[in-house]
Structure formats: C-alpha cells, structure tokens
Amino acid sequence: DHLGMMEDALAWWEERREHAPTEVTPLIEQVSILVRMGYYEECADLIEEMFSPPEMMMSLARSLSSMYPSGCLTPRSPE
C-alpha cells in the first residue's frame, strides 16, 4: 500500500528530527512527502519552521507532536 509507505516515511523522518533537530533534510523530506499526499497546509507549517529561530522550531515540534500523538505527522483530510 503506497499510502502506508508514505506514512512510514513520515514517521521515520520525524524520528530523525528528534535525533538531529538542527538538520533541515528531515523537514525537506517531510514536505516532499506531504506535497505528494496533497497536504499543503502541513507543508506550509514545516516550511515556516525551517525559517524560524531554533526555539520556535522546538515549540512547533511540540505542537505537531500533540496534534499527531503517534509520533508521526499523519495529516488531516484536506477541507
């Protein structure tokens, strides 16, 4: 199932972000996956995070973790 593979990839990159919070590559990879899935609002959030100060990045990561408690960005259905 292609969608399941994308969700697994999102989870893997999210875990990578926890181990290397200053790396940009995990964010870029997550954005590219979310674009393919059609979740543009979530992409915008991650792109904004890339250009935010480090303390803002950690705050957004905590917010996303509370929205997606499974530890992976599982996007909402487009409205």
Image (spheres, rainbow, N blue to C red):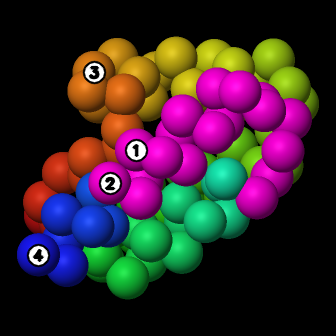
Disc 1 secondary structure class: helix
Write the start and end of the magenta stretch as one range. Answer: 8-25
Count of residue discs? 4
Q: Which residue is mark 2?
A: 8
Q: Is residue 21 above or below residue 39?
A: above
In the foreground, 41 or 12: 12
Label at residue 1:
4
Q: Position of residue 51 (x, y in %)?
A: 83, 49
Q: Please say if the residues under marks 4 and 3 sit with CB atoms less than 8 Å apart.
A: no
Q: Amino acid at mark 4?
A: Asp
Disc 4 secondary structure class: loop
In the foreground, 42 or 5: 5
Question: Foreground mark, 2 or 3?
Answer: 2
Q: Which residue is mark 3?
A: 69
Q: Is residue 14 above or below residue 56?
A: below
Q: Is residue 63 above or below residue 3?
A: above
Query: Nearer the N terminus, badge 1 or badge 3?
Result: 1
